[in-house]
Amino acid sequence: MSDLYSRVDSYFEEALVGDELQYARDAAHAAGLPAIEVSPCQAKFLHLMAKGAKRILEVGTLGGYSGIWLTRALANGGKLVTLEVDPKHAEVARANFTKAGIADRAEVIVGKAIDNLPKLEGPFDFVFIDADKPSNADYFAHALRMSRPGTIIIVDNVVRGGKVADPSQTDANVEGVRRLLELLKTEKRVSATAVQTVGSKGHDGFVMAVVGG
Ligand code: SAH
Ligand code: DHB
Ligand code: MG
């Protein structure tokens, strides 16, 4: 099945996205970073959702692949702030940002996201949460604190092959998604949904939330 998902993903990628940023993915893989960045079609999706944003926050930089796509969605004068715990990942991301010509508007902050988020101030127009999954709800709470009406918050990897809906699965990543869903259930300020995805990264999905007025 995942072979079929990959083939169709490649087909859409070729038709709609292109491989102009393959160098950024290659640089990250060559430096030994795990190949867990969003797929090209997913990156373009994030880009389209973020289009015209003035300030974008990302939690979980890796080699900067999603960060480049997000930065390219910014309005003139806009800025991406992306948080990364691993200094090596941050170094690769900064090099990729330089290669992409966006280093002047894409800032990598190194350290645990939970230590740096309280130091940031909003508003952010778009937030992409894609770091350690057990902290999803904490990151979401900070995203909400720094939001304005209309802010879009997207959280990656909420499906993980369906584990989230299987009560016998209780690993920390799955529990992290469930904690986020519990928060969303009671949080009156946001309206949310989840969209499953299949493709080169198998079966996964995003939570998407919009902050109300
Ligand atoms: N958004 C990237 C992929 C991020 S992978 C892309 O699609 O291109 C997840 C990243 O989160 C990894 O680089 C990992 O080092 C980082 N991370 C894990 N725990 C973290 C934490 N506590 N604070 C900040 N970053 C963290
Ligand atoms: C994995 C995928 C991701 O998109 C991520 O952010 C973390 C881990 C994975 O496939 O293991
Ligand atoms: Mg992810």
Image (tube, rainbow, N blue to C red):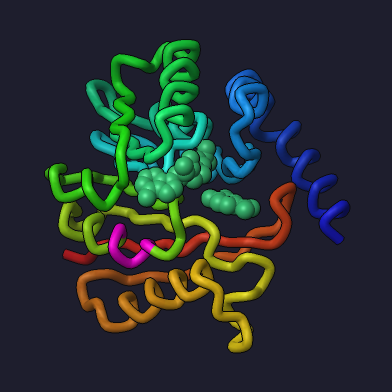
Q: Is residue 106 left or right of residue 206?
A: left
Please name whichever residue, 153 or 60, is drawn nearer the observer in this view of the structure: 60
Q: Position of residue 155 (x, y in %)?
A: 44, 58
Quadrant position of residue 110 = top left
Q: Is residue 26 magenta?
A: no
Q: Residue at x 65, y 28 (%)?
A: 29
Residue in the picture at 26% in, 52% down: 114
- Above or below: residue 98 compared with residue 6: above
Quarter holding the N terminus? bottom right
Q: Quadrant of residue 53?
A: top left
Residue 24 position (above or below residue 111) = above
For this rendering, which residue is in front, 107 or 70?
Answer: 107
Instruction: State whether residue 31 is above or below residue 118.
Output: above
Q: Position of residue 19 (x, y in %)?
A: 68, 25
Q: Residue at x 58, y 22 (%)?
A: 24
Viewer-side residue, 149 vs 31 = 31
- Give the image location of residue 84, x and y in percent: 38, 38
Q: In the rendered view, tell whether residue 155 sits above or below residue 86.
A: below
Viewer can see residue 49: no
Magenta-drawn segment? 135-139
Residue lying at 24% horizontally and 77% vertically, measured from the top left: 187
Q: Position of residue 97 (x, y in %)?
A: 43, 19
Q: Return the residue nearer the eye: 179 or 172.
A: 172
Which is the main secondary structure of the residues drawn in magenta?
helix
Residue 85 seen:
yes
Quarter of the image for the C terminus: give it: bottom left
